Amino acid sequence: MSDLVLVSVTGRDKPGVTHALTRVLAGTNVVILDIGQSVIHQNLNLGMLFDLSACTDSSKVMLDLLYKAHELELDLKFNPVTHEEYSQWANEKGKDRQIITLLARRVTSEHLSMVSQILTSQGLNISEIVRLSGRLALEERDQDEGKSCVQLTVRGTAKDADAMRAAFMSAATDMNVDIAWQKDDLYRRNRRLVVFDMDSTLIEAEVIDELAKEAGVGDQVAEITELAMQGKLDFQQSFRQRMALLKGLDESVLEKIAARLPITEGADHLIRNLKLMGYKTAILSGGFNYFGRHLQKRFGVDYLYANELEIVDGKVTGNVMGTIVDGNRKAELLKEIADCEGIRLEQTIAVGDGANDLPMLNVAGLGIAFRAKPMVRENAGQSISTLGLDGILYLLGFRDQDFQG
């Protein structure tokens, strides 16, 4: 029999199982080369790879393990491993490791089947699957609310990375699921700065459209806004056109609009926990400072850059003061803030929904198109459309149980 043995233990989980089994090995010179344990609905799956070459009586050790497992009402199996098989496994430690994250209101078997098929076609092997979202109550199963996330760790190099990304995007659209694909490296686990667009990202509104409604030019401004968000109009040009239509609006309207701004699902939960973990945060907006300051105070955001409305004698003039914060300016500001904080760009995250957010999404270590137009999703690194903003915590590898509230 091989001196390398894989021990598999299954059964109902209970406190002390791992201690009882490893206690049998104490003083036997058995070397544990690998170990892994998971519990699904109180059912234990424990695996240990042993090197018995230095053990003086390996038969007794295995017999003692069988007795102990029987005493604990567990099933235990031995599988010999050849040196060639072990060497092949050990040599895989240098392979690329990727993280695939599935996010949806409910992650289903169809989602997992589709993703695993794509991975298999690309020659990638799944080494670990974990659930990041909290346990689902039975009464919640049929609701459209809630959130679900499963994370897969895969090893290897994709045969065609572009084709795999395209397959993920197509499947995500067809099956109403978000699929994030990231390289598992040091930077993924060590992000330090998150910058947000404001309109249609932190808030579920375009402030300039709200101002336009109050000014009686809502349809005209909304049409220009939509073209700009789709990338069909230069942002600065469209911004000046919209601003000119606001001329004469009373300053008192701003406070009324600020008070009714709808906060995006998950924003409070996300930013509260980012701050608890020491992340720096920023709002980089093509909107207006007046409303940005309102959100900065609410969330405790560290940095705010937006456009300054010119107001004379209590009336909006239709002009903007200073440099317009467009897409390129957002990317520049991201770099400036990171440099000021001593943070590498690989450690930054940018979140936005419009075409003018693409420059900062592409500069950041992790760019996330949030509930964005198709063109933006296609050109950003990652996208979230099915969940709220706090779905970003899953992309960072956090579990629901890591946080309170």
Image (cartoon, helix red, strand yellow):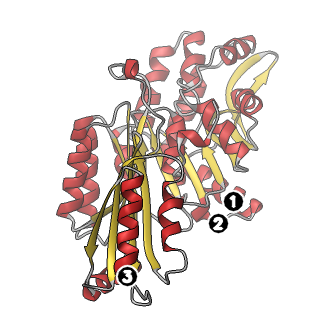
Residue under numbered circle 2? 344
Q: Distance between the Cα atoms at labels 3 and 2?
A: 52 Å
Tag of residue 58 = 3
Kind of residue indicated by mark 3: Ser
Q: Are marks 1 and 2 in contact (CB under 8 Å)?
A: yes
Kind of residue indicated by mark 2: Arg
Residue 37 visible? The answer is yes
Where does residue 259 sit, x and y in percent of width and height? Answer: 69, 15
Q: Earlier in the sequence, mark 1 or mark 2?
A: 1
Where does residue 137 sit, x and y in percent of width and height? Answer: 42, 24
Residue 182 visible? The answer is no
Question: Which mark is nearer the camera, 3 or 2?
Answer: 3
Q: Earlier in the sequence, mark 1 or mark 3?
A: 3
Where does residue 160 sit, x and y in percent of width and height? Answer: 23, 68
Residue at 60% x, 17% y: name it.
211
Kind of residue indicated by mark 1: Ala
